[in-house]
Image: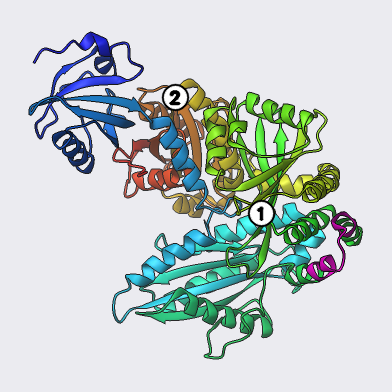
Amino acid sequence: MEIDFSVYDSLPCCAVVFLIDNELRIVHSNKVYDTLFDNEYIHMKDDDKKSFLDAVKLADSPKQLAIKIENLHNTPVFVNAVTVKLSDNHALAILIDDTERQEEMKRLREKSTIDTLSKVYNRVTAIDMINERLENMKPYTECAFVVIDIDNFKSVNDTFGHLYGDAVITMAAQHIKGALDDKAIVGRFGGDEFFFFMDNVSRENLETRAENIRLEILRMRNNPDDDSDISCSMGIAIGHDGATYTELFKQADSALYSAKSNGKNRYEYFSGEYFDEHAIGYIGEEDETAQLNEAEETQDITKVALEIASKSVTNESAIVNIMRHVGMVLNLDCVQIMKFDTVEDKVGIEFQWWKESNGAYNVVSTDKKAGYYMHSDLMLFRERFCKDNIFQYTPDFKEGFSPKYRDVFVASEKLNMIYASNTFGEEVFYVLCFHSNDKLRVWEQNEIGDMFEITKILSMFMKSSHTMSEREKQLERNLDYTPDGLYTLAKFDEEAGRVNREARKNGDRTAIIHFDFKYFYKFNRTYGKPEGDRLISLFSKFLLKGDKTKVVSAGIRGTDMFVSFVRYPRGMDICPIVEAKLNEFCESVGKYKTFPPIIKAGVCSFYPGDPIYKAIDIAKNAKRGLQPDRCVCVEEKDVDFEF
């Protein structure tokens, strides 16, 4: 068969001709293919190979499919393939690289499953996982569903501010996860309520873990003897084959009510007696009902908003209460306040109110969800608001934005959205987004006017709350940094986004490196805790020496474990470099004959956009079982982030 391949070399994609056999052997190819792959075969997974062969063999007309193949560096590449059968033995395939879009969609999907503040599963994801476990429960086995509520959280949050409250939520989540094994499903309902599910668990094992959680959260108190300070109450439901999530939740919620009624700071099993399912609600539910009744008595939404603000003790409570009021009166499904920082090129969701799909209750979240974007994206937003302070989003608005931001818009196009901002060109400005799930909803002119008036009121409070007290600044430092200056895990996720953005821009690879010391417990027992603390401090300073545009590092409080997020050129083997630097560090800290410092490092390399927290687990497991005589760095090679 004579084919002129030169016609395909000018295409902005990869076009090749395949000999149709089960090995996908390449008979001829054009120059573009050779530069990308330069090998005799197309490599892909068995499922993709079958789909590809079926499409070619059965295709009397062009067929399109999405597959994953490997390039010249054995790196997975996602492509849209168009195949055309030329004869019984030959076919033409045009491959268009779809990797960047797939990676970004994966990042967005992963982000939607994790609660940003606590780093545990969000409510919807965790419940879906629990339902799947329940459906697959083996006969004659038990499972446990536990609801956890932080005692006195509202009082503490109102007294010390939302930064302190954020720190409490973050640390509580870490203690809950730390007390459970990897198979447990941990989620956050919202506010100060968590839950976890375990299957194939004994009562003794369950009670040990529940007691450890109770004690760890109790240790978070500022004053150990102050019963008005933080503790936790837990309600436990035991299920068997055939149990449902709804049944377990009602039982655990009733047990939680009993635990709180009996003095808090304890766990109790479901006794068989159900309490009112609305007895325990989310923070602010009672205030929300009162505000709804008040709003129904007047048509002046801004007047009521100002009245609510005047009765609020803090700026934060004013913002929260006004958002709740506006959401209910205008029958919205979500209201967001976003902070745009054109200096750091960062966008963060400062506050978010939404209505649950069943309409049973509403939730206000003050989680700080932030990400780094192209400077041009933020400037485009600001220019639009300087022209129109409030407008309805339409698909043509995304034109001119970067691919990353366009994907954010595309993911939201099923919603009916109004954007509003009272900015006059400041470097830092706030944007409100009003969502309705009704795509066909027609916004009334008076609704548009009300939303802009509310935007001006909330912007005033946001700008006022931007100035933090010294106590809040100290609390923020405690939340973001370890005592030795490394990031905490909560801040690490945000700062990794900055390095991730640079990796995308430069075409670099990214990796998570997980560090810990061999027999650190024995080191502490032999040389004393001060020496162990000194070693941790020295290693923290060692990690801080890295180029901040290429690496960010975090310390895991109370442990000898650290993580780094790094970017590096494609094709570089970072393990020998890391190993050499670790051995150099350990030799510099002094001589310890019995238990010399030895660091184990695990590496998980991946592409920008893959989920960081999954990579941390993979990197941690890469060095499991290692007992080296010197510092060692190993990489988990068989990594596959499924899309």
Residue at the (78%, 60%) spot, across then down: 325
Per the rendering, the mark at residue 394 is none
**Distance CA(mark 2)–CA(mark 1):** 37 Å
Sort mark 2 into few (<14), some (14-19) or many (20+) by Cα contacts within 10 Å.
Answer: some
* Residue at mark 2: 508
Q: Tell me: 260 left or right of 554.
A: right
First of labels 2, 1 by sequence position: 1
Per the rendering, the mark at residue 334 is 1
In the rendering, at what x and y percent does residue 7 appear?
Answer: 26, 10
The front one of 369 and 261 is 369
Q: Tell me: 494 left or right of 242.
A: right
The front one of 142 and 211 is 142
Residue 299 is one of the magenta-drawn residues: yes
Which stretch did the figure color magenta? 291-304
What is the chief secondary structure element of the magenta stretch?
A: helix
Disc 2 marks a residue whose amino acid type is Asp
Disc 1 marks a residue whose amino acid type is Cys
Residue at the (45%, 23%) spot, across then down: 507
Camera sees residue 633: yes
Residue at the (14%, 30%) spot, across then down: 24
The front one of 296 and 497 is 296
Helix, strand, or loop for circle 1? strand
Helix, strand, or loop for circle 2? loop
User: Where, quadrant-wise, is the N terminus in this rendering?
Assistant: top left
Vertical placement of residue 217 versus 473, above or below:
below
User: Where, quadrant-wise, is the C terminus in this rendering?
Assistant: top left
Vertical placement of residue 353 versus 368, above or below:
below
Q: Which of labels 2 and 1 is toward the front?
A: 1
Q: Tell me: 58 left or right of 627.
A: left
